[in-house]
Amino acid sequence: MGARDHLTMRRRRGRRLGAALLPIAALAWLAPAAPASGADQPALGIELNKLENSAEGCRSVFVFDNRTGHQLSRFRIDLILFDPDGVYSKQLLLDMAPLYADKRSVTSFLLDEQPCEALGSVLVNDVPWCENGAGNSLDCVELLEVRSRTDVPLEK
């Protein structure tokens, strides 16, 4: 057998192998992709983005990222403030609604009349009121993902 015959046989085998792999490749292309580490799971992100001292006290900037798939027409959050030693300082009940579906929102409010240095941590104690646009209650505590970009931790 000459070099030309070997080349012809290789081409035929390559075509058969390619034809055999085509249905497998098509199935792999049609199969749904696996979710990327929870990125497609419903969640409600709350980020303590910034703290700054003002004449009134410690002003906060929070970012809410509503990835629940629902508009939250009622959303009330219960925050507990602790001093740097971990001692209870204050409780805040804040109405943050509405939080629109698949949208990030930024809000700023006065956390405390004290300077920000008097703040040790912030606890998301509860979400006592969380309803979607249809008026159905949701368990928003289970959906919470909290983080802080400041030196003051935000916890749940």
Image (tube, grey):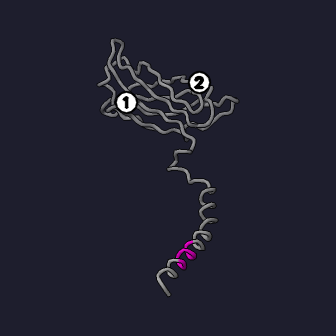
Residue ID at (46%, 28%)? 63
For marks 1 and 2, the one nearer the N-term is: 1
Region in magenta: 8-14
Magenta stretch: includes residue 69: no
Judge by depth and name the residue closer to the eye, 46 or 19: 19
Name the magenta segment's main secondary structure: helix
Magenta stretch: includes residue 9: yes
Where does label 2 land, which residue?
98
> Tag 1: Cα neighbours inside 10 Å, few (<14), some, or many (≥20)?
some
Q: Is residue 141 left or right of residue 156?
A: right
The picture places residue 66, in percent across and down from the top left corner, at 55, 33
Q: Is residue 53 left or right of residue 79?
A: left
> Tag 2: Cα neighbours inside 10 Å, few (<14), some, or many (≥20)?
some
Asked if labels 2 and 1 touch by Cβ distance under 8 angstroms, the answer is no
Q: Is residue 69 left or right of residue 118?
A: right
The picture places residue 49, in percent across and down from the top left corner, at 39, 29
Q: Residue furthest right?
A: 134
The picture places residue 155, in percent across and down from the top left corner, at 42, 37
| Foreground disc of the pair 1, 2 | 2
